[in-house]
Image (cartoon, rainbow, N blue to C red):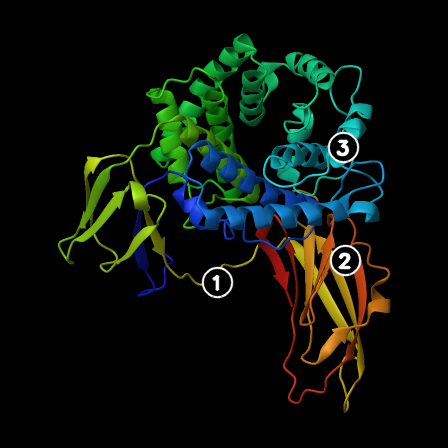
Amino acid sequence: PAEVLEGSGRATFSVIGDIMGPALQNLDRLLEMPFGCGEQNMVQFAPNIFILQYLNKTKQLDPEIEDKALNFLRTGYQRQLFFKHDDGSYSAFGKADNQSNTWLTAFVARSFGQASSHIYIDKNHVHSALLWLQKHQLPSGCFQSVGKLFNNDLKVWLKITGFGFLSQDTMLDNALHCLKNVSLDKTNLYVKALMAYVFTLTKDMEMREQLLDMLEKETGRLLLFRRLQVLEIMTVREESSLIEIVAYILLAHVSKPDLAPNDASVSKLVHWLSSQRNAFGGFASTQDTVVSLQALAQYAALIPQEIRDVKVTVKSKETSPLEFHVHAKNKLVLHQASLLAVPGIYTVQATGSGCVYVQTTLYYNTPPPKPEDVFILDVETVPRECEGVRKEIDIHVSVSYVGARGTSNMALVEVEMLSGFIPVRSSLEEVRHFPLTLPEEMKIYFPEVLGETSLKLNISVEQDVEVQNLKAATVHVYDYYKPGEISLT
């Protein structure tokens, strides 16, 4: 990019003998966000299930990877129970919420059911969630949308509850009746891709083929334009949605029992999806990472990936060649080396028998981007100026949203503590959602920030340890699902 700081570029070349390798090496780095609420916890919980399923099926489960994934599952399971209501449903902040959440309850029921093959899951948690969902299924077969979904990009899931109705026969039959009444001509690509996956799972091949034919024409043009950079100005949100669409189409293909290993259309989807990965094996956002890992794991488990001995050579006129040897015993080991000439032109040659996954990763620094002016943040301290030592300070925070959407997703207000100061807990009773407090920084989650009103937050902090030469502390607010939408003071 033109805005790269001169001299900051560096690059690596990596080779691994398994298409799931990058994800396996970075399980704890795929989704670099705080474990805030029940919604965020679950989108970090699910990928571990898909990876364990894949490794078990391909008989290459390494004890170290297994321990890591199982530990993540156990931790996520216990954490999710904090967000359960007495009626068996779930919401982002549990009993602190006035309402349960349809989508999250369905997601939990499905994920807990899948995870029960790997860790202990109390069946009552799954059963009670399904009973709650059943009570909210309408006569049409559709599900009543209950509760606030804090990532607005996920709202379409509520239309077909892709994670929920695949669990019980009666609920499934009624939900399929709802889906079959959807007008395909008025449905966007995202919903069509989800429906293609659902009808594949339910073995309705007529509906599946109709949807896949429509999707092939529409996404084919879209991916062509993307490759030709006609759509170069796609936002991160649009890029993430396109990744999800392709992942669901791939799931629809690989969920068919008689998939041919040499299916060209499937290979194209896998190739494109793999090329969208970031340096850690994940994708653009939490949600597209969950779906894409599931799709790639199912594909990799179906397609034989025998490897005997593959030699990969990377050549450049400016540097000495790099050589990598991958064989059956080290196929899950990430082989990586730095590319010394950046920018530079490199050629890659592979010889031998087998399939390997290669990736180049470019790292560079850019000037700090100008934040989008979507939040207005006002912070006032009482007293405004201190004469002498103050043992207690009041902080008044006001936040409003002025972005194009009219309302934000879930927003985080992070109040950095002055050195030696801690929050006065009694002053936080008015804050409804308060899942995480650290001594040096306080994070407060808000379901949303509306454009017409301001959120008011009054916090008192008190000195716990006397510190000399205090430095200024900051307060900032950002959209959890769009961290680029930030305001700082």
Task: Give the structural element (helix, strand or loop) at label 1.
Answer: loop
Q: Which mark is residue 136?
A: none
Residue toward you, 447 or 352: 352
Question: Given this view, does label 3 or label 2 mark the residue nearer the observer?
Answer: 3
Q: Dot 2, how many residues are within 10 Å of its Cα: few (below 14), some (14-19), or many (20+)?
A: some
Q: Earlier in the sequence, mark 3 or mark 1?
A: 3
**Which residue is disc 3 drawn over?**
129
Q: How far apart are marks 3 and 1 (CA)?
A: 45 Å
Q: In the rendered structure, are the residues bearing label 2 and label 1 in contact, judged by CB atoms less than 8 Å apart? A: no
Rendered image quadrant of residue 175: top right
Residue toward you, 59 or 143: 59
Q: Residue at x 80, y 29 (%)?
A: 132
Q: How far apart are marks 2 and 1 (CA)?
A: 30 Å
Question: From this viewpoint, is residue 389 visible?
Answer: yes
Q: Dot 3, how many residues are within 10 Å of its Cα: few (below 14), some (14-19), or many (20+)?
A: many
Q: Earlier in the sequence, mark 2 or mark 1?
A: 1
Rendered image quadrant of residue 454: bottom right
Residue 140 location, x and y as percent?
76, 14
Q: Which residue is drawn at 52% across and 15% down?
A: 211
Amino acid type of the residue that numbered disc 2 sits on in the rendered structure: Phe
Q: Which of marks 3 and 2 is nearer the N terminus?
A: 3
Residue 32 location, x and y as percent?
54, 53
Residue 309 location, x and y as percent?
22, 40
* Drawn side of residue 11 relative to residue 478, left or right: left
**Which residue is disc 1 drawn over?**
368
Amino acid type of the residue that numbered disc 3 sits on in the rendered structure: Ala
* Drawn side of residue 299 relative to residue 11, left or right: right
Residue most toward the bottom? 388
In the picture, which quadrant includes the C terminus?
bottom right
**Which residue is disc 2 drawn over?**
434
Q: Which residue is drawn at 43% across and 30% down?
A: 301
